[in-house]
Amino acid sequence: MSMNKSTQKIIFVDFYGILSSTRYWFSLENPKHKWHSYFAGIQDFLLVKNRELLDDWMKGKYTSEDIHHILAEKLDLNFDELFQVFVEDCKKIEFSKKILKKLQTLSEQYLCIMVTDNMDSFNRFFLSENKIIQNSFHEICNSFYFQKLKDDRGGEIFLDILQKYNADIVV
């Protein structure tokens, strides 16, 4: 399919796996961390045994506080301490400034749009600390606020964005 001159050109960028490989609760991976022994349990609880809970969090059905209350109860942890670790880790997530600088050079010719399957914590704790991310994209579409994941209904979120900006898929 070709593009006509009035059609927008869009570059879609994901966050995790492209701009960053830092996991939530990353400080707990350090064997010297007070709560290191709980890292595997948190990962197993959310990523393996209760993946639907994680997906629902990314779809806006739970807040970060809700999830941490569940984790605190299920893993017998102190909510306040666990949540504080989470918030502080969110603020310190590492990301590629090199990729962002390249995207910024393309922003005159393309709409640069981040589409991420993420949670409220991404906007609340990470983006608020990292203005360079906000300034590198024309739009940031977090699944938490769109209430759908990238692969829901055949990638519907991408089709919605393409329609919003009068853009076509080019192959």
Image (cartoon, rainbow, N blue to C red):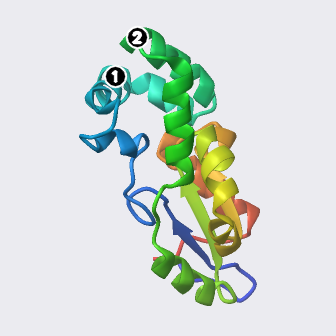
Q: Secondary structure at mark 2?
A: helix
Q: Position of residue 167 (x, y in %)?
A: 67, 71
Name the amino acid, label 2.
Lys
Q: Position of residue 3 (x, y in %)?
A: 62, 83
Q: Is residue 70 above or below residue 156?
A: above
N-terminal of the two: label 1 or label 2? 1
Residue at 75 percent across and 84 percent down: it is 6
Find disc 1 in the rendering and name its residue.
Answer: 45
Contact (Cβ within 8 Å) of mark 1 with mark 2: yes
The answer to whether residue 117 is visible is no
Label 1 – label 2 distance at C-alpha: 9 Å
The answer to whether residue 8 is visible is yes
* Position of residue 24 in the picture relative to residue 141 (left or right): left
Find disc 2 in the rendering and name its residue.
Answer: 74
Name the amino acid, label 1.
Phe
Q: Nearer the viewer, mark 1 or mark 2?
A: 2
Q: Is residue 34 above or below residue 71?
A: below
Residue at 47 percent across and 23 percent down: it is 53
Residue at 51 percent across and 50 percent down: it is 155
Q: Is residue 85 above or below residue 44?
A: below
Residue 20, by quadrant, is: bottom left
Q: Position of residue 162 (x, y in %)?
A: 65, 64
Residue 28, by quadrant, is: top left
Task: Using the image, tell me which numbered label, if any, was put on residue 131.
Answer: none
